[in-house]
Image: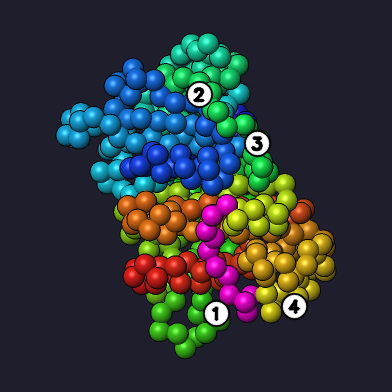
Amino acid sequence: MDKQESIGIKRLEGIHYYVRDLERSRTFYVDKLDFTETWRSSPELEKQGRQRSAAFEAGNIKVVCSEPVGATDSASMGRAARFLSKHPDGVGTLIFEVEDIEKAFKLIEARGGTPIDDIHTSEHPEGTLKMFSIATPFGDCTFRFRQHVGTPPLFPGAVAYESKKAKTNRFGFEDVDHITANFQTMKPMLLWMEHVLGFEQMWEVSFHTADVDPSKKSGSGLKSIVLWDPHSGVKFANNEPQRPFFKSSQINIFNEELRGDGVQHIAMTVKDILPAVRELRGNGVSFMPTPGTYYDMLPERIVKSGVGKIDENIEELRELEVLMDGDHHYQYMLQIFLKESAGLYNDKSAGPFFYEIIQRKGGKSFGAGNFRALFESIEREQRQRGIV
């Protein structure tokens, strides 16, 4: 396929997350992660959209959470209620900033994309906003494209919220590193991303726990392909289940829990992951556990990966359960995964979405060497919740 003209994405500007309990989300982002609440929906917007919303920010990361309000009959439901009538809590919209909204709309539609609405313009005290949304193969997750002058809110009709809490971001969150999504079969989505949005393939891995222990009667496997937009650097890691044991694959279980394809996790970069994780743990944030055997084998993996050596003490990585992976001389990355929302809140309706925290030290990979540790950790978490 010939290289396509860029649609002009500048960055992933934010995510829109639909929840049943906005106050619980507010506690998580503000009190646990030290995000700052910056916007809230106005009474007029809540009446019109039949949902209550708030925006939380840290560094360049923006998250909008919305809960349904008002009528629950299908004819009167707002977007949050419609999403949650079919799914547990989850990501319903990914929001992209683009350079030229008219150009983006024209290219996407000409390539077979499906706009949900036309471009519409709104004026705010903080600036002018133009945007449109499209349907996607990411289940019920839509994509929204925005061009703005000034700093208007992520959702029209929001009002600025002056928090009494000082804006600190004390854990050092910086940017969204990548989005990871799960599919029963990902080829249609890959073709759509390539042909409609102009993304290109940059990385691939295929993995199965049977590689470790062929005597297992069940296991978990996946095929993962990373697509990126060379213009902006926005990256999507995309997974599908792999045989044998397709039904017990983490990817299939995620899809059954979400009741469809969709976003599994968002990776957020931090300036210095070790003190960040230490303080987050002290602040009551729960992470997926990593077995001690992972760290017993880590010195050998560091040598075999070609990294050579790392700056961090392995015993500190073991203590904090931070994972390491790399594939070049002195180039590696450190990562850790928060518990799935259902596990964080002990509530199945909170859904299987989770966050990753990552620090890149030159490494551009996606932790192929850590997939087993992550899968085994998720499996243990799911067994505790009686899912597998």
Indicate whether 342 appears above or below 323: above
Q: Nearer the viewer, mark 2 or mark 4?
A: 2
Residue 157 % position (x, y): 42, 18
- Say which residue label 1 marks: 211
Q: Earlier in the sequence, mark 3 or mark 4?
A: 3
Residue 249 % position (x, y): 42, 68
State the SS at label 3.
Answer: loop
Which label sits on residue 168?
A: 3
| The image quarter in which residue 21 lies | top left
- Segment tinted magenta in the rendering: 283-294
Q: Residue at x 28, y 37 (%)?
A: 81
Q: Earlier in the sequence, mark 1 or mark 3?
A: 3
Give the class, few, some or many, for how many residues have Cα within 10 Å of label 4's Cα (few <14, many ≥20). few
Quarter of the image with the N terminus in it = top right
- Say which residue label 4 marks: 300
- Say which residue label 2 marks: 161
Query: Alpha-carbon distance for marks 2 and 4?
Result: 51 Å
